[in-house]
């Protein structure tokens, strides 16, 4: 997902910190709470305490995408050390922060936005201290652990990417022009006071962010909200917002968290229908037939008085009268026949729909760009004893692991660019285990152990190559060889039955395990193409991997996994070596 060129929001001070209803189609909701801080026990608890609700389902049913929502808190320290002006100044001193890529500077004067960016130069604290300057700092979660923790939790709960921008407005700042965004927006006030004016959307749930808007073009505000430290304001995408300055003696700071970009049913249909047409053209000759000869002579808006809406009505009329119309009558009107054929082909796409694969593709893109788990030092399984058949295991960060089926012939996301297959991961795990055991031996024994591990690994690799299925012709040629070569080939061929890594029954389909443990926090939502980690397993491991991933918070005994002992131990070792598991 790309960061669209969205304009920064504006902010200013307010002396009262109250909500004023001006009038609107949907009454905004207000929640008052004195909760002490965000509860990071689970991603769900983070969302509940942030929104000050006991029932998230009610919020997402009655408020989400429908109307603004305000949380007034009695505790002004609710966000703690989340972000402040001093944090920004400290980051500028420590890190190399650039104009445009990392920060936008601007002034809003007499209804116009004046950009103050100096392209190609590094920003310093002097730039942001100028009177009347508005600062928009992209993705502060790259540098501030507290924001990383919050955004990672919200991404885990929403299963969607979350942008975050920090705004600092110096005394005298007039913010920016009225505008609307293309994402659901949450405003978290951390310093100072801000007055927000909200206006009726120009388009409900807009898919595009707007340029600067003129006040005379957007009418009167429907709501006004005054935010103080600890408060939260939510409003749906497409809502026109305009932070209005009230006083200019102090600076103000807030975070804007935005999410659900390009996550509509329309976006889903774009993905599903594109794949459905491809599948239909492969399997059904009707989709491969050519268009009628000279069809431009009877089709096209320039040839008819009807517009697209009337054409649509005409299509529906055609569909209703299909039963009454004979083939000869339909053929007599080439325009009607053209529309009828198109409608029938669209209806036929239903049998080619693959919504699960479309969702997997969306999840894959999400995992590629999301934040890694919040932890300064993520635990690695190889640091402890390797699990045995009697061990109890569970996924260390279950929200960051996804199991899906990858079809190499169909180009399913992640299948052709997986980091490693199970055999390689398991070999690496065995080598790591041998190295751990050798740490308790003397120096010469340690060297000998490493040499043996290396020789074992090389032997496994050679065996893996030798156990690939052979053609009948190749087998006949081998029979004409020497006796010892025949015996060796028979031994290697018999290994096919016990090889835990072959995928004969799966063909082009594999089980893929995606995880974002190794994602780079420094590139989160900065427009750089990134990839999550992917492990590839034979299709028969599907049940066992689903067992592990579905249990989530519960430990499961290795011996209970739906695989033969050798295979389940190999699978568990590869997951352990990747740092995905923890022991009870």
Image (tube, grey):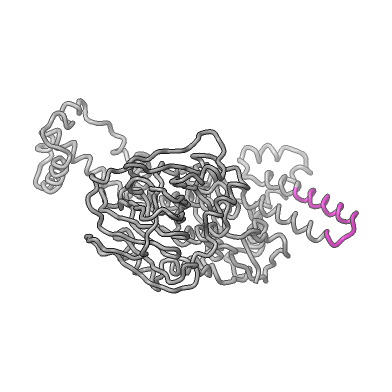
Q: Tell me what residue is drawn at x 45 percent, y 38 percent.
A: 116
Q: Quadrant of the C terminus?
A: bottom right
Residue 370's spot in the image, x, y percent?
Answer: 51, 52
Prevailing secondary structure class for the magenta stretch in the rendered image: helix
In this view, the residue in front, 37 or 521, is: 37
Instruction: Give, as a single range, the part of the protein colored magenta.
Output: 439-457
Q: Is residue 206 visible?
A: yes
In this view, the residue in front, 126 or 115, is: 126
Q: Quadrant of the N terminus?
A: top left
| Residue 443 drawn in magenta | yes
Instruction: Indicate whether 406 appears above or below 147.
Output: above
In this view, the residue in front, 250 or 190, is: 250
| 523 left or right of 242 in image | right
Q: Tell me what residue is drawn at x 55 percent, y 49 percent.
A: 532
Q: Tell me what residue is drawn at x 62 percent, y 71 percent.
A: 557
Instruction: Indicate whether 406 appears above or below 473.
Output: below
Residue 580's spot in the image, x, y percent?
Answer: 62, 60
Q: Is residue 504 visible?
A: no
In this view, the residue in front, 28 or 424, is: 28
- Residue 67, by quadrant, is bottom left
| 417 left or right of 8 in image | right
Residue 109's spot in the image, x, y percent?
Answer: 36, 42
């Amino acid at each position: 997902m790309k960061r669209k060129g969205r304009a920064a929001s504006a902010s200013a001070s307010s002396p009262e910190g109250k909500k004023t209803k001006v009038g609107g189609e949907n009454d905004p909701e207000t929640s008052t709470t004195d909760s002490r801080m965000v509860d990071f026990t689970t991603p769900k608890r983070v969302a509940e305490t942030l929104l000050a609700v006991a029932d998230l389902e009610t919020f997402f049913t009655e408020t989400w995408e429908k109307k603004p929502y305000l949380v007034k808190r009695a505790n002004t320290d609710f966000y703690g050390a989340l972000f402040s002006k001093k944090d920004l100044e400290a980051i500028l001193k420590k890190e190399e922060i650039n104009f445009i890529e990392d920060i936008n500077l601007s002034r809003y004067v007499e209804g116009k936005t004046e950009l103050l960016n100096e392209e190609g130069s590094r920003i310093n604290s002097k730039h942001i201290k100028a009177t009347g300057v508005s600062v928009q700092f992209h993705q502060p979660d790259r540098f501030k652990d507290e924001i990383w923790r919050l955004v990672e939790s919200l991404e885990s709960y929403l299963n969607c990417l979350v942008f975050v921008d920090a705004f600092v407005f110096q005394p005298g700042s007039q913010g920016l022009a009225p505008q609307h965004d293309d994402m659901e927006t949450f405003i978290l006030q951390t310093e100072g006071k801000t007055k927000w004016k909200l206006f009726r959307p120009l388009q409900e749930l807009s898919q595009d962010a707007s340029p600067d808007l003129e006040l005379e073009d957007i009418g009167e505000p429907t709501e006004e909200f005054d935010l103080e430290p600890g408060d939260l304001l939510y409003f749906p995408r497409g809502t026109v917002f305009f932070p209005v300055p009230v006083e200019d003696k102090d600076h103000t700071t807030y975070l804007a968290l935005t999410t659900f970009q390009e996550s509509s049913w329309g976006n889903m249909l774009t993905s599903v229908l594109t794949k459905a047409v491809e599948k239909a053209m492969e399997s059904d000759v009707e989709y491969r037939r050519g268009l009628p000869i000279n069809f431009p002579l009877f089709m096209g808006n320039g040839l008819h008085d009807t517009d697209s809406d009337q054409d649509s009505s005409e299509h529906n009329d055609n569909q209703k009268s299909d039963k009454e119309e004979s083939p000869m009558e339909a053929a007599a009107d080439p325009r009607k026949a053209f529309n009828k054929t198109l409608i029938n082909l669209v209806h036929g796409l239903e049998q080619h729909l693959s919504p699960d694969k479309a969702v997997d593709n969306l999840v894959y893109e999400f995992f590629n760009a999301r934040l890694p788990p919040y932890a300064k030092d993520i635990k690695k399984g190889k640091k402890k004893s390797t699990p045995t058949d009697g061990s109890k295991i569970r996924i260390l960060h279950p929200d960051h692991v996804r199991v899906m089926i990858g079809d190499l012939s169909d180009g399913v996301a992640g299948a052709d660019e997986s980091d490693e297959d199970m055999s390689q991961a398991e070999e690496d795990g065995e080598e790591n285990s041998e190295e751990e055991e050798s740490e308790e031996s003397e120096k010469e024994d340690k060297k000998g152990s490493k040499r043996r591990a290396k020789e074992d690994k090389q032997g496994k690799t050679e065996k893996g190559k030798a156990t690939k299925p052979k053609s009948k012709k190749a087998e006949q040629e081998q029979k004409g060889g020497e006796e010892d070569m025949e015996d060796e080939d028979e031994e290697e061929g018999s290994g096919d039955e016990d090889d835990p890594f072959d995928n004969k029954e799966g063909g082009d389909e594999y089980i893929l395990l995606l995880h974002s443990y190794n994602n780079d926090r420094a590139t989160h939502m900065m427009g750089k193409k990134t990839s999550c980690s992917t492990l590839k397993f034979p299709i028969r491991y599907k049940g066992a991997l689903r067992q592990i991933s579905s249990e989530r918070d519960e430990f499961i005994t290795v011996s209970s996994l739906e695989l033969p002992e050798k295979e389940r131990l190999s699978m568990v070792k590869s997951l352990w070596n990747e740092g995905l598991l923890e022991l009870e």
